[in-house]
Structure formats: C-alpha cells, structure tokens
Amino acid sequence: MLRKVLVGLAAIALAASVSAETVDELIAKACEARGGVAKIKAVQSVRMTGRMTMGPGTEAPITLEMKRPRSTRMEFTVQGQTGVQAYDGKQAWGIAPMGNRKPEPLPDEMARNIDAQADLDGPLVDYKAKGHQVELVGKETVDGTQAWKLKLTPKGGDVQYVFLDASSFAEIRNETHRLVRGQEMDILSTFSEFKESGGVVWPHRIQAGPKGRTEKQVLSFDKVEVNVPIDDARFKMPSR
C-alpha cells in the first residue's frame, strides 16, 4: 500500500514538473515571437498613434504612450475635445472630453485596471519574479486558429486567460474578469495585424468588449514609435 502511495506521489510530482516546464517553454516562445526578452526590455518608451472606433460612425483619433517603470497616458479626441486617461505609477487620473475639463482622480477599479496595463513588458515576462502564477489549461480554437490557453493569476490582480497562437506563439486573445462600473464581467480582447517596430512585434489592431455582447471598442494603430523621448510630466496629474 505504501509503495502505491509513493508511486502515486511521484507521478503527481512528475506531472507538476512537466506542466511547469511546458508553461515556461510556451512563455519563452511567446517572448521570442515578440522579438526576444532582451529587445522587449530594451524598450524604454513607446508611442502608438491611430484611431479608436466606439460604434458605427464614432471614430476618435488616439495616442497611447507608455514609459518605464510604470507610466501610461492615453489621449483621444471626441467632437473636437480631447480626453485623457493617465497613470504615473502612483496616481491614476483623467480628463473627460466633455464637462468641466478638469483633471480628476479615476475610480479605484479603473486605477487598478490601468496599473495592470502599465507593465511595458507584459505580465508573462519574468512572471515568477513579479509574483504571478501561470497554469497551462490546454488548447482551444480561437476564431478558427488553434491556440494554447494559459491561466494567469497576477499578484493582487484579476485572473486572466491568455491565448497564444499554437503556430506563431503570438498572443491573439486575452480574457480578463474585471469590475467595471460596479459590475463584474469578463472583458475579451483580441489582437491582430502584428508588425515590428524597434525590434519588437506589436499588435496594430486591438478589439475589446464584454464577453457575449456585440458592442466592441477597436483600436487601430497606424504608427508605433519605440524609445521616443517622453517627459515624465505628461503622466502626472496637473493641479486643478
């Protein structure tokens, strides 16, 4: 009986080891698909310009800027008025395109989402050092493409499911459980039109929206600039 128990425990330990190695292998391939860890970490800043489509006939110019260690700023223009959502690593704030046009702190749930998105490397790079956990779920078909499905549990963050193209290992989908305006929902993001800039491959089209609903927000980037000078002051909330 004891022998069977020991054999069973050994089998479990071996399975866990193989699973961990498989996860790390997939993540390594995903990083290589982006250009390699060295080139990813060499990116100190990025500016992406394009347009945001929020519905039929509603399109807004958009600029997204990110800078190490953990700053981000998005500007978009609606009916001639510019809105801002920004984060300097400590304070998340925004300016509504309509209304009093004054900078205001963002609600806690939005601040937490922006903080999660401000990691320039992405959560899979050095995930263990960051305190994240990643599990291999298996394979699924994503819009006709076979993909590896990883369960990512960020340290102090919301659980995500990351889908890697089984052939190219590019991240083609992300599913995140979030609190949005007080309601819990799954946000589905798909990534496509991958192009290289600064030695790193970036998605130039991102479609996002609540899972199971028809309304989607689409970001289409025409230009991606890497290691451009960006003043730290752009990420800090101005005095009101």
Image (cartoon, helix red, strand yellow):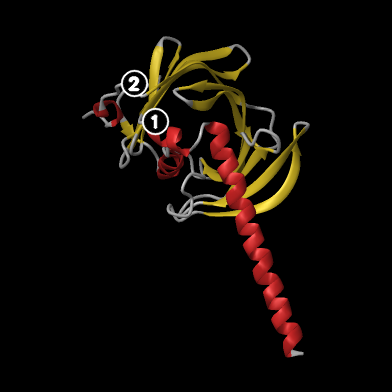
**Residue lying furthest left:** 239
The residue singled out by tag 1 in the image is: 43
Q: Quadrant of the rendered structure where residue 118 is?
A: top left
Residue 184 appears in the rendering:
no
Query: Circle 2 — which element?
Result: loop
The kind of residue on which mark 2 rests is Val
Eyeballing the image, is 171 above or below 183? above
- Sequence-earlier tag: 2 or 1: 1
The image position of residue 77, as x and y in percent, is: 43, 15
Q: In front: 131, or 210?
A: 131
Q: Residue shown at 39%/14% (left/top)?
A: 81
Name the residue rendered at 43%, 52% in the picture.
130
For label 1, the SS is: loop
**Residues under numbered marks 2 and 1 in contact, where contact means CB atoms less than 8 Å apart:** no
Q: Is residue 206 left or right of residue 236?
A: right
Return the mark for residue 112. Answer: none
How many numbered discs?
2
Q: Residues within 10 Å of mark 1 (few under 14, many from 20)?
A: some
Q: Check disc 2 and report the residue beneath it.
A: 228
Residue flagged by tag 1: what amino acid is it?
Val
Quadrant in which the C terminus is drawn: top left
Residue 174 occupies quadrant: top right
Of 156 and 168, nearer the camera is 168
Q: Quadrant of residue 31?
A: top right
